[in-house]
Amino acid sequence: MKLLVTGGAGFIGSAFVRMAIAGSRAAQVVNLDQLTYAGNLENLVPVAGDSRYRFVRGDICDARLVDALVADVRPDAIVHFAAESHVDRSILSPAPVFETNLRGTFTLLEAARGNRVPRFLHVSTDEVYGSIEAPAEADEDYPLRPSSPYSASKAGSDLLALSYFVTYRLPVTVTRASNNYGPYQFPEKLIPLMLTNAFDGLPLPVYGDGMQIRDWLFVDDHCRAIFAALEKGRPGEIYNIGGNCSLPNLEVVRRILAATHRPDDLVRYVTDRPGHDRRYALSGEKLARETGWSPEVSFDEGLARTIQWYRSNADWIRRVKSGEYQTYYELNYGNR
Ligand code: NAD
Ligand code: TYD
């Protein structure tokens, strides 16, 4: 398969590209990425010299560029990761979220339609279902009740993508994954933020009471699920991808403190996130039934692998946490 990947310099996209090339799951991968604050070519060093891989820097909102690229590459599938992916940033500054996640997805769908791309996989999130009261779990028909500008933009782009299947018969599949973690994740998200702060002996800022529940999915399991959906999933369908690992945030933070041999009093309870979803919970039964996929990496193993990776990549952390990151950190946490 010849794949056009968007957002392949980010956390999940780069894991997918590395897996596609290292596992010879794709004959060719073209990676379109704008290299925003979250995009990092260091994440792609393992594939950079491979003749099956090509990087193109560009904005998915640039209709001329996107259309010309799709016409040139003639991919067997587009796998669309590119997004503004962070809830807190979407609260501080919603405009880029709507540009990239809605207009960017629209631009790609139009290019896919115009060039008759045979497969379009839209990567989405469990956050589109909003907060879910225990003990319920969202299946793919669960109502969409997004709470943040980020999750609302993802819900909107999911519906737009699915409308292209209904209206134009563009073979779109939507996947909705739970919270990912693993190597190369930008340290604005819970696990790498807490981990890198713990390394430095800095406070760990827990929002509200820390009892919000997330379902954790190791990034390589997510990538395997995307390949499963691409190869065996049906066009016009949505597939949830869950990690079978629900934990309160405070428990995650405590495990990080224990693993890094730091004291519990590094925890700082800070003002809660506005509109904070209390609990996410997914049923991934449909993907398991139709493709045979299931998560392979337990949370203990995934966290140990993640910690090991961050321990071994101090230079990556230092570069990523310099510059713009400091401004963001002060803005989000300075007066909390
Ligand atoms: P990320 O923020 O690490 O990476 C996003 C990538 O998209 C970056 O490389 C960035 O440069 C690129 N990008 C942003 N705007 C762009 C634009 N206009 N044009 C081209 N490239 C652009 O994100 P991630 O955590 O890897 O998430 C990838 C996808 O997976 C997103 O669609 C996200 O909604 C979805 N998702 C993420 C999670 C999670 O836990 N991180 C869970 C479920 C779904
Ligand atoms: P995050 O990684 O931002 O993912 P999402 O909001 O998409 O689930 O946050 C995961 C959980 O951790 C969420 O409940 C918010 C919480 N959180 C904190 O308590 N402190 C923090 O500094 C961050 C970044 C997140």
Image (cartoon, grey):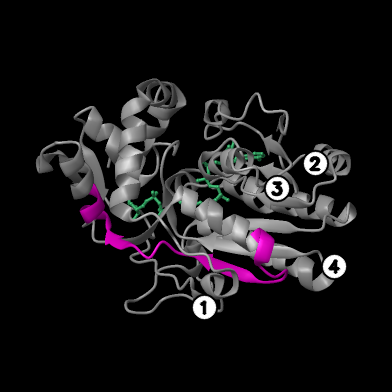
Instruction: Please give left or right for residue 289 compared with residue 56 in the image.
Output: left
Task: Tell me where residue 180 appears, x and y as whole percent.
Answer: 43, 51
Mark 2, residue position = 66
Q: Is residue 252 magenta?
A: yes
Which residue position is annotated with label 1?
A: 142
Tell me: residue 309, above or below residue 89: above
Q: Mark 3 points at which residue?
A: 104
Q: Name the residue under label 4.
A: 168
Residue 30's x, y, as percent?
73, 37
Camera-side residue of 98 and 287: 287
Query: As displayed, is residue 125 above or below residue 134?
Result: above
Q: Which label's residue is closer to the chain start, 2 or 1?
A: 2
SS class, disc 1: loop
Residue at 27% from the left image edge and 42% from the top image edge: 336
- The three-letter code of the residue at mark 1 reads Tyr
Mark 2 to mark 3 CA distance (whole Å)? 10 Å
Mark 3 Cβ and ligand 1 under 8 Å apart: yes
Could you tell me how far apart the alpha carbons at marks 4 and 2 are, in whole angstroms?
Answer: 19 Å
Q: Nearer the viewer, mark 1 or mark 3?
A: 1
Label 4: which secondary element: helix
Q: Are marks 2 and 1 in contact (CB under 8 Å)?
A: no
The disc, 4 or 3, on the residue closer to the chain's N-terminal end is 3
Examine the rendering and report whether any part of residue 241 can be seen. Answer: yes
Q: What stretch is highlighted in magenta?
A: 230-253
Label 4, label 1: how many angstroms apart (C-alpha)? 25 Å
**Amino acid, disc 2:** Val
- Left of 231 or right of it: where is 335? left
Depth check, front residue: 20 or 58: 20
Question: Residue 253: x, y in percent?
Answer: 23, 48
**C-beta proximity under 8 Å, tags 1 and 3:** no
Which element type, helix, strand or loop, lies under badge 2?
helix
